[in-house]
Image (cartoon, coloured by chain):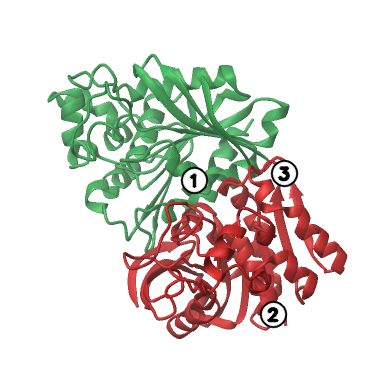
Chain colours: A red, B green
């Protein structure tokens, strides 16, 4: 593992590190914020999964999350959104290939050898961080924005023993029924839609739900509402009687100004779950 | 004036606007955050002047200032750092020409016709904003980072009737004696150093000081300490017996992680002055 940069930040450290990922078969880069409390012992951690076209850097610089993580004494991980490098398959579209890993393990060529973001986020990266930093991997929460909200919700519902709490900002809620999903799930997983189900938050909510707190924020002014389909997940939550807070926020769009506005609430929400006895 | 974008943000609006600047002789772009309170009447305003290579966008997306401006009910202006466009002179170096206006009115060719950031910030832009938005230009505070800290300090000390409070993050404090200054002041103002004095915060502090609150933060881990020369301004403040808070912050560097860390304090500091009776 290599240190790309470390900056003092809200009494702690905002680091950027790179490492050779076995899961993705390439060099991967991630951001990690450690609050001051990490010097005295392992702190709980909140994963932030980013959206289409993002790298590890977007939320690290634009979400304003560190101030709240410092206030609550929790670490933040900002992973990349796909494998990277010249050997990695790509597509001309912004929403397939690099920057668009969709948080799954691809089973189809040409994506199969590298596009394994599910295992990377759920297994390889937590192990690496747990070994190298003062982070308590028995206390993980997960959130994300847009494609990253999809990732957070599907990871949490599939791996409830791993995540104590889940939240999302303007998530892609129903990729099986959206142009932000059908193309990608077909490319990465193939045409058999039964393999898509665990990667669809609305389907997972209907089938499994989540045995922990759930918070979702969606702006009413979001330019991508037709692709995000908040109504699908909202209905699935209500139908299941799933304890959850689903907020339609008046006027907010899909930008990081929206994410930043509600970040304080999300970090506090996860901190409550992660510091609960 | 044209609206480039408007995003809902912390209950208010983060806007980006462009206009034809008479002062700079080109199209200029600025960011303006208006808190919710601006709907009920004019709110006080804090100017944020950015550093070398920045545009209006850097602090608007990376400083996290809006959350605190919303909390205190003040507007934020994020101006660009120089004139722009194909007609505007430039230099190959990052620290001269575009992105490096140094907040002065150039008297030398080829800079003279466009590089008038002093008048732009002090006169043209406040008039434009005051006419078009719910902002009270009788209550202005000013801050900035690096070259923008230089701008904030020199504008405030030269125009004390205009600014009630001044602060700075890692300012260039003594450009007459720094490689971040001598080259630029010579290029923009000519070799006669008497014309430089009003653009040197250390000189201005020694000669005039500021009849209002002053707050300066400087990281001890800043990679540019030799160019910023905090010791020059600190000594001038102490020598003058100027009421001021000058903080050397342990471990912080020159990045926006440093700026974001102390932004809450700076916005609260200005809000105190701007809401004082």
- The relative height of residue A261 versus residue A32 in the rendered view (above or below) is above
User: Is residue A189 left or right of A201 when viewed as pictured?
Assistant: left
Please report, as a chain letter, where disc 1 is located: B
- For the C terminus of chain B, the image quarter is top right
Q: Which residue is mark 1?
A: B61
Q: How far across and down, in percent of the image, does residue B55 sit?
A: 39, 37
The mark that comes first in sequence, 2 or 3, is 2
- Label 1 residue SS: helix
- Label 3 residue SS: loop
Residue that extends furthest to the front in the rendered view of this protein = A191
Say whether mark 3 and mark 1 are on the same chain: no
Say whether mark 3 and mark 2 are on the same chain: yes
Q: Is residue A70 visible?
A: no
Residue in the foreground of this view, choosing between B181 and A49:
A49
- The relative height of residue B131 versus residue A268 in the rendered view (above or below) is above
Distance from the alpha carbon under mark 2 to that under mark 3: 29 Å
Q: Is residue A175 visible?
A: yes
- Label 2 residue SS: loop
The residue carrying pointer 3 sits among few (fewer than 14), some (14 to 19) or many (20 or more) residues within 10 Å by Cα, namely: some
The residue carrying pointer 2 sits among few (fewer than 14), some (14 to 19) or many (20 or more) residues within 10 Å by Cα, namely: some
């Amino acid at each position: 593992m290599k240190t790309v940069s470390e900056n003092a930040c809200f009494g702690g450290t905002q680091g950027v590190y790179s490492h050779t990922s076995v899961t993705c078969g390439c060099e991967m880069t991630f951001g990690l914020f450690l609050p001051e409390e990490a010097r005295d012992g392992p702190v709980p951690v909140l994963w932030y999964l980013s959206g289409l076209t993002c790298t590890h850097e977007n939320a690290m610089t634009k979400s304003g999350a560190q101030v709240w993580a410092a206030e609550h004494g929790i670490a933040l991980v900002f992973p990349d959104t796909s494998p990277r490098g010249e050997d990695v398959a790509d597509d001309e579209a912004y929403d397939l290939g690099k920057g668009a890993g969709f948080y799954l393990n691809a089973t189809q060529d040409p994506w199969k050898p590298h596009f394994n973001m599910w295992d990377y986020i759920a297994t390889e990266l937590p192990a690496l961080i747990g070994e190298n930093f003062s982070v308590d991997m028995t206390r993980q929460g997960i959130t994300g924005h847009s494609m990253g909200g999809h990732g957070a919700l599907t990871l949490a519902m599939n791996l409830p023993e791993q995540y104590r709490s889940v939240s999302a900002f303007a998530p892609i809620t129903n990729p099986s029924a959206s142009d932000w999903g059908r193309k990608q799930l077909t490319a990465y997983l193939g045409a058999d839609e039964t393999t898509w189900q665990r990667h669809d938050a609305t389907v997972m909510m209907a089938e499994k739900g989540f045995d922990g707190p759930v918070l979702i924020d969606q702006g009413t002014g979001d330019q991508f509402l037709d692709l995000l389909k908040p109504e699908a997940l909202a209905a699935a939550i209500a139908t299941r009687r799933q304890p959850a807070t689903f907020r339609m926020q008046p006027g907010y769009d899909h930008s990081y100004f929206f994410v930043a506005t509600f970040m304080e609430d999300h970090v506090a929400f996860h901190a409550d779950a992660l510091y609960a006895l």
